[in-house]
Image: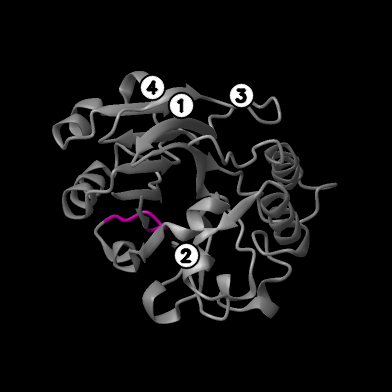
Amino acid sequence: MAFSVATWNINSVRLRLPLVEQFLQTYQPDVLCLQETKCPDDLFPHDAFKALGYEHIAISGQKGYHGVATVSRRPLSDVNVIGFCDMGDCRHLSSVVEAGNKKIRIHNFYVPAGGDEPKPDINPKFAHKLGFLEEMRDVVADQGDGFSSILVGDLNIAPLENDVWSHKQMLKIVSHTPIETETLEDLRVKGGWSDLMRHLIPADQKIYTWWSYRAKDWDASDRGRRLDHVWGSQDLENHIKDLQVLREARGWERPSDHVPVIASFDL
């Protein structure tokens, strides 16, 4: 059975709803996980998604900031939200979807960006990010008894050398500092997660999912980072068949600075 999951930091779901509708009409993933929806639950555009066949919706939103949403063509069950760092931010949502002979818990994450200064003693935002990552260690991959796990989202860290345009120049830039990259990789491995993007695309190849709004010509300069990720329980390594990073979406009208990533499985 073919099954696909997409992740996209949309940077305001209501502002960019036409782009989301265009994406769903063209690519039709079974599940779409959105981050940075910036929308309280009572204003989420349910009807627009249901009109496109995405009748199953789980949301955790707040006004103006953060927020995650999972929309699906398949029923969602056991919806759960984890709060991190006692901040009251809406940065996590999980739900279970059935596909093939598997029940898959899908975690949708939006990790704090961390500000500009990579020093937790003088930058509370960076300290928050590191604290968030430590609490993420409790989110481990389920595997066995018919269950599998997928973790997607904007993790705001580019862990590998070829996840950034210049490893050397980025080592002191938030999102690619050693404390971030080493912590993320450590919690991934210890949590039983496989980096499914790098399972299909070797580590010696560049992958970017984000290009800054500050670039005058993002396409020409191509100073990207892989901030968006697809992890899975290790049993899914044998089932993932394709990965699409929709670079062209960065050039759409009024785009997000992130682009959609679609993982396709044969279950």
Look at 59% across and 44% down and name the residue there.
111
Q: Percent position (x, y) of residue 224?
A: 49, 70
The residue that mark 4 highlights is 41
Q: How many marks?
A: 4
Distance between the Cα atoms at labels 4 and 3?
A: 15 Å
Q: Nearer the viewer, mark 4 or mark 2?
A: 4
Q: Earlier in the sequence, mark 3 or mark 1?
A: 1
Farthest residue toward the right?
Answer: 121
Check the image and report above or below for 86 versus 142.
above
**256 in magenta:** yes
CB under 8 Å between discs 3 and 2: no
In the depicted view, which residue is nearer to us: 223 or 203? 203
The residue that mark 3 highlights is 88
Q: Percent position (x, y) of residue 162?
A: 58, 76
Looking at the image, residue 7 sits to the left or right of residue 80; the answer is left
Distance between the Cα atoms at labels 2 and 1?
A: 29 Å
Q: Secondary structure at mark 2?
A: loop
CB under 8 Å between discs 4 and 1: yes
Q: Earlier in the sequence, mark 2 or mark 1?
A: 1
Instruction: Indicate the amino acid at tag 1.
Output: Ser
Q: Earlier in the sequence, mark 4 or mark 1?
A: 4
Q: What span is in magenta?
A: 254-259
Distance between the Cα atoms at labels 3 and 1?
A: 11 Å
Q: Secondary structure at mark 4?
A: helix
Q: Nearer the viewer, mark 2 or mark 1?
A: 1
Looking at the image, residue 155 sits to the left or right of residue 104; the answer is right
Look at 58% across and 29% down and name the residue there.
89
